[in-house]
Image (cartoon, grey):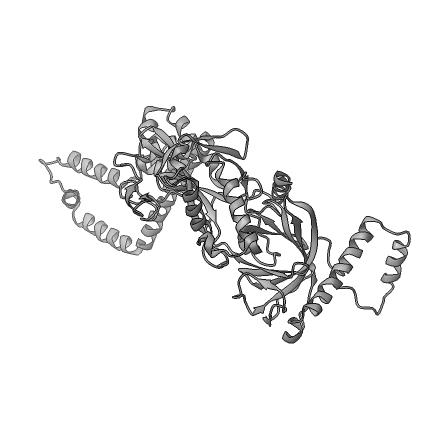
Amino acid sequence: MLLRMAVCARLCGAGQTRCRQSQADQESDSEMDMDEEEERVVGKMKDDPDGSSCHKTCGAGPSGAGGGSGVAGFGCEDSASACAVPPRPQSLLDLPPELLVEIFASLSGTALPNLALVCKKFRQILNTETIWRRRCTEEFGMKDDLRKMEIVGMSSRELYVKRVNPQVKSGRFVKLLPDYEHMDYRDVYTHLLHPYRHILGLWQPDIGPYGGLLNVVADGLFIIGWMYLPPHDPRVEDPMRRRPLFRIHMWEKNKATVECMYGHKGPHKGDIQTGKKDEFSTKCNQTDHHRMPGGRQEEFRTWLEEEWGRTLEDIFHEHMQELILMKFIYTSQYDNCLTYRRIYLPPCLPSDLIQPGLFKGTYGSHGLEIIMLSFHGSKAKVTKLTGDPNVPAGQLTLEIDLNRPVHLPDLEQQRNIEELSRLVLGEHEEAQRGMQAQDTPSEGSEAGLAQGSEGSDEAPPTGAEGVEPGACAYVSPPELQPFVLPLGVMARNEVYPRTCKMCFYGTGLIAGHGFTSPERTPGLFVLFDDDRFGFIWLELKSFSLYSRLTDQLSHAQIPSMERFESMLCNMQSWTS
């Protein structure tokens, strides 16, 4: 830290040097004018040898016969001192306070308390709000002005909670915000943002097979845990929905308060525990706030309307009703007392087919689920962040072989499921043979490789011939081509793109209830555009459509690809 201060001080000195150099350049630009003025002054001095003109120029007259020299000398020295450049600062203490504020504001907030121990001047300067406001902005993305903040980063609808009387179906709105008139940025940084900085980012809750996506953000004067929910089935292209599960704020000046936001009775007492690295837990201390006067039936009806946007009578499929009721019973038992594990967004490389990230997709009777698309050389992987009793969260739902593109026939043949099956199963058989050859290399493999290198007229198989190991074989996407689903393939949403860019062979994970007998089944990956793709499950005769999640997610960048691979393995082990 002291080294950085020294560098800053030298920069300040260099800045003054540049100022003096700039002043010198300006003086050189007017050198001709000054020479002419000097010639005129010298001419006057020759005409006036007693120096009266100099006295007049200096603003002082002669006093007596030989007087005036002292006054004139004083005037000249004063003029010279006024034009002299101030001395270069020898330490940080010599710098003006406004420059010290700028230097201190560029340091990390964790270094500022030690800086306050240096001297009284530094301690006084560190009380400047500008320094702590910049730390809150740069480290935690806090951009609001505490003095002008009214809605604290939340919409007007989210500022209030409706307390409903179930008998009359009406209620009153209660404001959730305290008064922050006397709050300052140093208190917010010291008692709120910095102590809870480790829980910012993306997390997956441990809710059995269902999982989830939690985004913890610094939202104005709050730290809020937002649970992200997919749109109502089957509107996959609608924006995500958010529900606050907890919040941390400074109800008092020097104390942060944790509140549970679950339920319909407003915020109440909660707790957050951070033990292991990349893991934390929430606990509600007043679970009675989660109960509704109408009992479990009213709680189920309210949950169903929020989760699915419909009533149970609107759902005619009996199996779907059972799945919905099972999810309500399973998830409601936690009462917002959950454990969360950190997850990261996938890294983005220039060679990726499209930008990796989070998507929402259709999964038949299970509704919409959230998945993560990532690229690993010649493979694309789709991992579930939310799941179901058949294939739980954390599992690899799709795996795409980018070295095996599939060229679609004309529209008439695309409608024939048998033709599509023939194309995909052909790629599947070749992929299986390739995997067997890698696992059990034959004795004649070297001879076969040598024979192939002599020059064969046969076309290379669809795959990685001429491609470096781990690289992708696909080329620049061609023009859009027509696309239509085969007859007999079920789709939750009939509104899907009718053109696509590219198609690849891939496999999808299917299993029985309770993740029993899992197996990978062949299918077709269809890339529609940069924000949408689909997958045709041949065995299930079903189609899943995926649309990109466009929300801005901060504090979620992975440090390295190796750590991301490790995270994916851990996610699978959580629910295996």
Residue 376 location in percent, x, y?
65, 51
Residue 15 location in percent, x, y?
38, 42
Relative vertical location of residue 187 with respect to residue 134 in this rendering, above or below? above
Choose between 142 and 393: the one closer to the eye.
393
Could you tell whether 462 is left or right of 56 in the image? right
For residue 91, say whether it is visible: no
Could you tell whether 207 is left or right of 510 in the image? left
Relative vertical location of residue 550 with respect to residue 574 in this rendering, above or below? below
Relative vertical location of residue 81 with respect to residue 483 in this rendering, above or below? above
The mark total stands at 0
Quadrant location of the C terminus in the rendered image: top right
Residue occupying the point 61% across, 59% down: 353
For residue 228, say whether it is visible: yes
Residue occupying the point 61% across, 38% down: 574
Relative vertical location of residue 250 with respect to residue 175 in this rendering, above or below? above
Residue 426 location in percent, x, y?
75, 63
Q: Residue 140's image quarter?
A: top left
Residue occupying the point 78% across, 53% down: 435
Could you tell whether 317 is left or right of 221 in the image? right
**Hey, which residue is sitting farthest left in the picture?**
64
Q: Residue 249's image quarter?
A: top left
Choose between 251 and 200: the one closer to the eye.
251
Residue 149 location in percent, x, y?
29, 43
